[in-house]
Amino acid sequence: MTESKHKNPILDIEKLPKHIAIIMDGNGRWAKSKHKNRLEGHKKGVKALKDIIKTCIDINIKCLSAYTFSTENWKRPKSEVSFLMNLLEIMIKKEVKNLKENNVKVNIIGNKQKLSKKLIEKIELIESKTNNCTGMILNLMINYGSRDEIINAVNQIKNNKTLSNKTITQDIFQNYLYTQALPDPEILIRTSGEKRISNFMLWQISYSELYFTDTLWPDFTQNELLDILIDYQDRNRRFGGL
Ligand code: IPE
Ligand code: IPE
Ligand code: MG
């Protein structure tokens, strides 16, 4: 994307989205293009995520949701899965202090049942240490799948006796999603050139503005994010109205 195509190439602080969601894709292809092992791509991907978190903090984005590991990613070779789990564990442990200092509240979102005890310990640590932070909310989706989230909501509602005679509205239903009271993302970004959603936030992105970029996730920079935000400010969001 280039700045010249925007009507107003200046970021308007008053018109920022509250919630940005990102499908961080392309780590493996980034590594391949550099004749490196896929795992190097994941390491570089963590670095890119840290930079984007910092940018979002700097420009005062209220919520960032990052798709980190899907319910389908278990299909990958065992060695890659364990590398990713280990990388997440290290990253989460390492970032507690920094995120807390930056007033970032971290939520790990997804089905935790399948995660290792060690990873769950780190998750509980970062969630409790940052629980009172009031700046940005950072959602890291780990073992997240939107269909799993929706089915989990249905089962919780089904098993809740206080709801048995109630008509389930969208507002009630939403409260049982992993994202609960968070506002829907105004923007969904997917890197790596793939134009699909891959089971990410299906309910929440009903009216999100979609951005597909060919950039591979490890190469995604602050400038590209700012460019997307400038473009977003020119979009006409109608929500079905006129
Ligand atoms: C995204 O990069 C990271 C995860 C899905 C965990 P990929 O690992 O999917 O990279 P590509 O798509 O193979 O290039
Ligand atoms: C989506 O990427 C999941 C994450 C970015 C964590 P994938 O690489 O798993 O998606 P597909 O397989 O290309 O649809
Ligand atoms: Mg991929």
Image (spheres, helix red, strand yellow):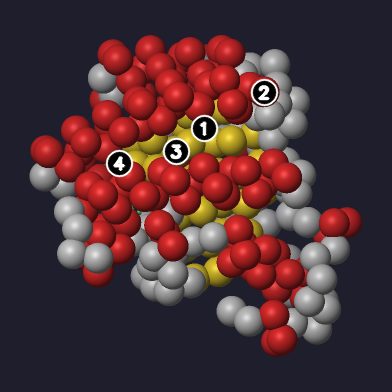
Secondary structure category for the residue under label 1? loop
Q: Which of 199 and 233 is in front in this view?
A: 233
Q: Does the residue labelled 3 lie within 8 Å of ligand 2?
A: yes
Q: SS for tag 2?
A: helix
- In front here: 155 or 126? 126
Is the Cβ of the residue at disc 4 closer than 8 Å to that at disc 1?
Answer: no
Around disc 3, counting alpha carbons within 10 Å, would you say few (fewer than 14), some (14 to 19), or many (20 or more)?
Answer: many
Task: Identify which residue, 7 or 166, lies in the foreground.
Answer: 7
Say whether disc 2 or disc 4 marks the residue closer to the N-terminus.
4
Question: Which mark sits nearer the N-terminus, 3 or 1?
Answer: 3
Amino acid type at image mark 2? Glu
Q: Is residue 154 visible?
A: no
Camera-near label (3 vs 1) is 3
Tell me the residue that label 2 is attached to: 101
Query: Residue 133, image x and y in percent?
Result: 70, 22
Residue at which label 1 appears:
178
N-term-proximal mark, 2 vs 1 = 2
Q: Where's residue 5, x and y in %?
A: 70, 87
Asked which quadrant contains residue 84, the reply is top left
Q: Which of marks 2 and 1 is in front?
A: 2
* Residue 188 at least partly seen: yes
Which mark, by number, is residue 71? 4
Q: Residue 141 carries which label?
A: 3
Q: Which amino acid does label 3 sit on?
A: Met
Cα gap from disc 4 to disc 1, whole angstroms: 14 Å
Q: Of callouts 3 and 2, which one flags the residue occurring earlier in the amino acid sequence? A: 2
